Image (tube, coloured by chain):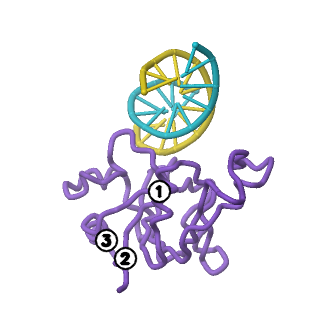
Chain colours: A purple, B cyan, C yellow
Amino acid sequence: MSRERHYWLMKSEPAVFSIDDLARAPKRTTCWDGVRNYQARNFMRAMKPDDQVLFYHSNADPPAIVGIAQVVKAAYPDPTQFERGHAHFDSASTLAAPRWDMVDIQFVKKLPRPLSLDRLREEPLLKGMVLLRKGSRLSVQPVTKAEWQHIVTLAPG
DNA sequence: GCCAACGTTGGC
DNA sequence: GCCAACGTTGGC
């Protein structure tokens, strides 16, 4: 029995790591390190290879979904939590019981045109999206199949 | 740069 | 376990 594909959204600040950075990366793949929020971590732990990811630019003008990626490696410990002096170092985490995980994701495609936050808000079918909830700051979040399918229809090409 | 919303920390 | 203080996120 194979597990059905799941859908997700991941935020990145383009000034730090953009969809173009992902497209240029070796094997068009990157590890998603630096997540230090338990809810976001738990969602990453639920990811499996072949799951699909909406790549979202936060702190951008405009904030928007800009591309699609896919999970290529399930959750494993984020090494930066053990690097003393690193911005994401966590002194409370141990090798025996790492607190923070990351996944690997691979570039699939860039949308021909970004789907802005304003554009997404115009869609009644997307009203329930985690991304659109007031005060939502989760950097890794689930997307329903219905939401995914609708978003794909909004993106020409 | 502002600030609302949210998560975490730590004193009690 | 409560909650004030603080830090961060991220749209605007």
The residue singled out by tag 3 in the image is: A152
Dot 3: what SS?
helix
Are labels 1 and 3 on one chain? yes
The residue singled out by tag 2 in the image is: A5
Quarter of the picture holding the C terminus of chain A: bottom left
Question: Depth check: A30 or A56 in front?
Answer: A30
- Hey, what amino acid is under mark 1? Val
Vertical side of A119 occupied by B10: above or below: above
Q: Quadrant of residue A68?
A: bottom left
- Hey, what amino acid is under mark 3? Val
The residue singled out by tag 1 in the image is: A140
Dot 2: what SS?
loop
In the rendering, at what x and y percent does residue A138 appear? Answer: 45, 49
Residue occupying image coordinates x 72% and y 47%:
A87
Few, some or many residues within 10 Å of mark 2 (<14, 14–19, 20+): few
First in sequence, mark 2 or 3: give its number. Answer: 2
Few, some or many residues within 10 Å of mark 3 (<14, 14–19, 20+): some
Residue occupying image coordinates x 69% and y 45%:
A92
- Hey, what amino acid is under mark 2? Arg
In the rendering, at what x and y percent does residue A5 appear? Answer: 37, 76
Vertical side of A99 occupied by C1: above or below: above
